[in-house]
Amino acid sequence: MEIEVKKSCGIFGGKKVEDRQVVWISHGDEAATLPNGFEVVARSQQGAIAAVEDKDRRFYGLQYHPEVTHSPEGMETLRSFLFEVSGVNAGWKMEDVMDEEIKVINNMVGPDDHVICALSGGVDSTVAATLVHKANGDRLHCVFVDNGLLRYKERERVMETFERDLHLPVTCVDATEQFLSKLKGVVDPELKRKIIGKEFICVFDAFAKELENNLGKKPAFLVQGTLYPDVIESCPPPETGRTTLTQSKVIIMLEVFLKT
């Protein structure tokens, strides 16, 4: 869809009034009334508000996706906002985040503390474990549980990534029979989640106790690779009417760690 610039604006760089550009608008809704201080700086062909500006406070809003390939000039809009309007520099690197997080971990975990982590093979727990390993080395103890519900050869591929590529200290526990025997004949998804969660607690608890015996003390920290959406999934607001996913990893891991 084409939008037309109605007013010169910082985020549109050198765009002039009446200049047009193609953008991707996938929303069926539109803004009808603007907050105090805002002006319309671009509209769609149908007259819908496409971009707004509060010049004094340097606030901007777009009713389209500048980040997608269907908005050919969208990246230039983002560049203008970042470097011309906001005045940021391009010196940031992903390594900066890693170094900062490693410092945070080192400040939190004592030199003699051990850390325990359950790895699922997903991005969240893998990234968390990798950061802790870079900070604390082999005082990190990871466990990967094969519950018999993995994809074909997934266990082998995941363990190869953990050990060969990331050099993580991981123990693989084959609990296939334990899980599948408990799930036999069960068709209700919520009941399956409860069973899987309960059995995972048993497996992780056994691993934690064995680790405690080997170390002579309990691990001081639990690595939890959890994003905020996991928390929302675990505890949806009552007014939504959604059923809590009983055995979400957030609940499971906290239960286990408090128990051990």
Image (cartoon, grey):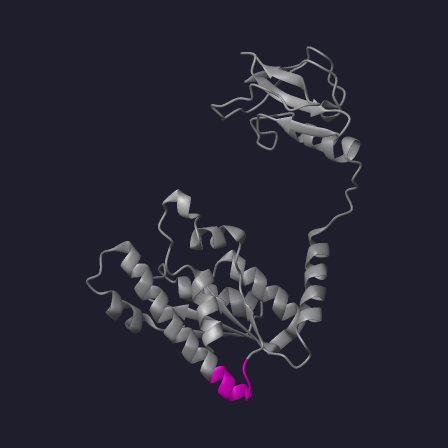
Q: Is residue 219 magenta?
A: no
Q: How many marks?
A: 0
Residue that sits furthest to the front in the current view = 239
Q: Which residue occupies the foreground of this view, 233 or 119? A: 233
Is 227 located above or below residue 67 in the figure?
below
Q: Position of residue 231 (x, y in %)?
A: 49, 54
Evaluate whether residue 159 shows in this view: no
Magenta run includes residue 215: yes
Q: Position of residue 197 (x, y in %)?
A: 36, 65
Q: What segment carries the magenta color?
A: 210-218
In the image, taking residue 41 as reference, residue 196 lies left or right, namely left
* Residue at x 51%, y 84% (from the top left corner): 212
Instruction: State which quadrant residue 106 falls in.
Output: bottom right
Q: Residue at point 53% right, 70% down?
A: 163
Could you say where residue 57 lies in the image, as x and y percent from the top left?
75, 30
15 sits left or right of 259 in the view: right
**Residue 11 image offset from top left, x and y in percent:** 72, 26
Left or right placement of residue 216 versus residue 39 in this view: left
Return the residue nearer the eye: 204 or 134: 204
Dominant SS type (magenta):
helix
Q: In this view, does 86 lie above or below 7?
A: below
Q: Nearer the viewer, residue 85 or 152?
A: 85
At 57% across and 60% down in the image, what residue appears?
Answer: 127
Quadrant where the N terminus sits is top right
Asked whether the viewer can see residue 34, the reply is yes
The residue located at (67%, 70%) in the rendering is: 108
Q: Quadrant of residue 84?
A: top right
